[in-house]
Amino acid sequence: MPPLPESAPSAPTARPTICPGCSEPQAPDDRFCGRCGRDLNAPPDPEPAGQEPDAAEPQGAEPQGAESRAAGTAAGAAEQAPPGQAVNGADPQATGAFLLAPPRAGSSDETLPLGFSARLSDPDGPDGPDAPERVGAPAAGTAPGSAPVPASAGPVCVACGLGGVDDDGYCEHCGHAQPRQRDHQEKELEGVAAVSDRGLRHHRNEDAFTLGSAALPDGSAAVAAVVCDGVSTAHRPDDASAAAAATGRESLLAALEQGTAPDEAMRGALLAAFDAVGALAAEESPEPPAAHHNSPACTYVSAVVTGPVFTVGWIGDSRAYWIPDDRGTPAARLTEDDSWAARMVSAGLMSEAEAYADERAHAITGWLGADAVEADPHVAAFQPEGPGVIVVCTDGLWNYAESAAEMAEAVPADARTRPLASARALLGVALDGGGHDNVTVAVLPFPTGVAGAGFPPA
Amino acid sequence: MPSLSKSNVPQFSVDVYQNEYLPEGGREVNAIVTVTSTGGGTSGGRPLPGNPAAAGVVIMVDCSGSMEYPPTKMRNAREATAVAIDALRDGVSFAVVAGTHQAREVYPANGGLAVADPATRAQAKQALRKLTASGGTAIGTWLRLADRLLSASDVAIRHGILLTDGRNEHEKPEDLQSALDACSGRFTCDARGVGTDWEVKELTGIASALLGSVDIVADPAGLAADFQAMMENAMGKEVADVALRVWAPQNVEIAFVKQVAPTVEDLTARRTEAGPRVGDYPTGSWGDESRDYHVCVKVPPAVVGQEMLAARVSLVLPEPDGTSQVLTQALVRAVWTDDMAASTRISPQVAHYTGQAELAQAIQQGLEARKSGDLDSATAKLGRAVQLASASGNEDTAKLLAKVVDVVDAANGTVRLKPKVADADEMTLETRSTKTVRVKK
């Protein structure tokens, strides 16, 4: 069977009014048979799906063909339909379950623009408790969520491989929600990289991050990362985190460019983000009734490298760690959580182990949002002795590497030279650990290699 | 308020209230779908191409012999019909049918409908004077005649108003049922029982099959006001044959679809297939109003972190060419989570209407048990009804219940059956048992 072009669904071929496979009557605009799932655009006498080697045919790819497919996808994936849409030969109706896409093997991090390195190393493979692969887009972290895959590409459901995708982003056959842009995001700038992922247990990604750099008045460069974690029990947590990350980044960079001291700029950014999240509550539509309705809320952690120092600011329980290149020197946790557990420990009421074992451990005591008690930004500046990386992350990561030593173990040795690969590796740690929450991690090499930034004086 | 810029088809909006979060392995998704239509024209109907007369109403008046006892009954029925005729807007088509063991055209008596204007209204009221009471009751024949008259005129909104005082004694129940089957979907009909000699189940069955309201007019003197209200309600309808369309994905099973406000009406069995995995449930005609539906679907279990569309609910309007126009739609979702706080929460709307449906059932079962002499069961069921009515703020139903039982403790549902209950009170309670109240905001 000849490969079908991507535009096949819109080709003006006369479609059968009954399914050639099972004789089920079809509406003129049906693309697949509602009964047997047959592709109505396919030529009348197709071979069994398992013998189709071509990667362009949405239904044809086989798990066995993954190696050759991966090579083809690596180059062309950016403009193709999600690579995860391939399904194995089993009949999804027979199993009744959502089919999971097979992993692609034999591809390296550098050549894969979509960067599923973490997922690819998942030993569970297609049988694991995995979610379908996402439409990974290396887009800006500020992009608003849930943009459905463009219909013109004729996307096919990633779960059942049978139905088309409707305007709301659900499969027209099995109803399964399709991957959203925010489910997995990556970004790399000179001197900083970050990855954000939905994880394995949450249905959407409520984390957000932004990266940026600015030229300081003295000509040196400042590199910053902002990571926010939407509070799940609040309304629109994904909007809250996106707004906070975007606003914080803008405020921070603008202040630095004007020559504001980094700690003042950081404090200003935290307050600007706080106001941005608070403003979301004001624009609320009365759509969900008042019962069980919390204002949009999120946490915030940010780090900015300016010459020989770096500055960290935070509200909530997202964290920053210092991981020195020389693992002989101690790594450090740079932030103090606004959380129940941290309060119990600092008040001397419980040991750290006891406090974090408690089910209330993660209840946060400080956040950005209209219903926060007060805006209480924490800012700290550091001047490390040697090179290393700053890891800025949400609890979706640090739950699996809580102490500074554990985090140092998880961070690859070459993190400073390969920040994006390191961020992916850290995401892999979180997913291997169970991926119970959204995971977002930014890696900032220190000193920054960005042109204009001087090596810190010894 | 009428707006010249708007079409006569009202704007429909759909809101879904649900807790979409399910625990791991959870299968049942409940949603309350609130449908509101607003802003239609006030011309009384949706104009069909080339046909300005868009609404037709047939009034069916029981003229069986029993209507003469007491003689005020026939007089009141005549007066009420006259009031209803006066309420007809100019341009609306209408007819009056006298019902006995057979159906007879009273006005215009030409095999069709008359168009309302001052002259025809006067003629119709003149014709009412000739109504006399004699003969039996065969409601099926009345409905069939109404259907013939309405279908003879090309009207989009077809409505009947049926008044009876007695049981359908002069035809077999099967005959009535087959008449209902024949008329169902062809016109809507409100039914009123006057006095206490009629059968509640019979009239509620008619109103339910024909998507209309049912009520008791225990005192014939109240007829005129009720007829006027019914006619104004019918005049307010702007669009007919609206269906609630439910699409569900493969392997998703629709457990039930019920109208839950303003009254409880189970529509599950009235589904007609409209395509693969798509079914239409009839809702009849709509004016400016709001109704609530409870949709319950069973989805295949999935692991935590998955999300799916459990159902897509839309309002559709059939077009003359056989296709249908989607007026509005909304989504019912399912999201599996390990957050117990999220998955164990019950939507207040779902909880409320689940209680209202149970309330209607408890009243019906309680009255049934009382009639059959099972007093323990009747006390338990009616006690539960009192409890539900009290908790949900359904005060009208609570008042009706208080005429049948002595309430000892409403919160706990402790009641005593009254030794003597007026027939009218018992019938009123039974007839109005399906009336619900909306969620307290």
Image (cartoon, coloured by chain):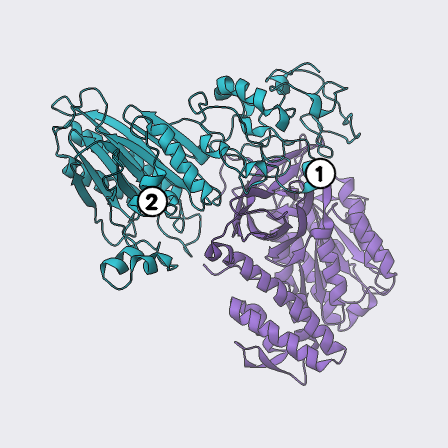
Measure the alpha-carbon separation of dots 2 and 1.
59 Å
Which image quarter holds the N terminus of chain A? top right
In this figure, which residue is indicated by the disc labeled 2? A406
Expressed as whole percent of the image width and height from the top left, the position of residue A158 reads: 58, 32
Q: Is residue A203 visible?
A: yes
Q: Amino acid at mark 2?
A: Glu
What percent of the width, then of the height, locates residue B181?
A: 80, 50
Query: If the image is split into quadrants, where does the C terminus of chain A sit?
Result: top left
Q: Nearer the viewer, residue A192 or B52?
A: A192
Which numbered dot is residue A25?
none
Residue B42 in view of the camera = no
- Same chain letter for marks 2 and 1: no
Residue A84, image quadrant = top right
Q: Which chain does the numbered disc 1 sit on?
A: B
Count how many numbered circles sit on residues in the image: 2
Query: Is residue B427 toward the left or the right of residue A140 in the image?
Result: right
Q: Nearer the viewer, mark 2 or mark 1?
A: 2
Image mark 2: chain: A
Residue under the image location 49 percent in, 38 percent down: B3
Residue A237 spot, x, y in % from top left: 38, 44
Color used for chain B? Answer: purple
- Residue at the bottom extreme, as displayed: B419
Q: Which residue is mark 1?
A: B274
Is residue A129 found left or right of A382 in the rendered image?
right
Horizontal arrangement in the rendering, residue A334 relative to residue A442 (left or right): left
Most foreground residue, A156 or A10: A156
| Contact? badges 2 and 1 (CB < 8 Å) | no
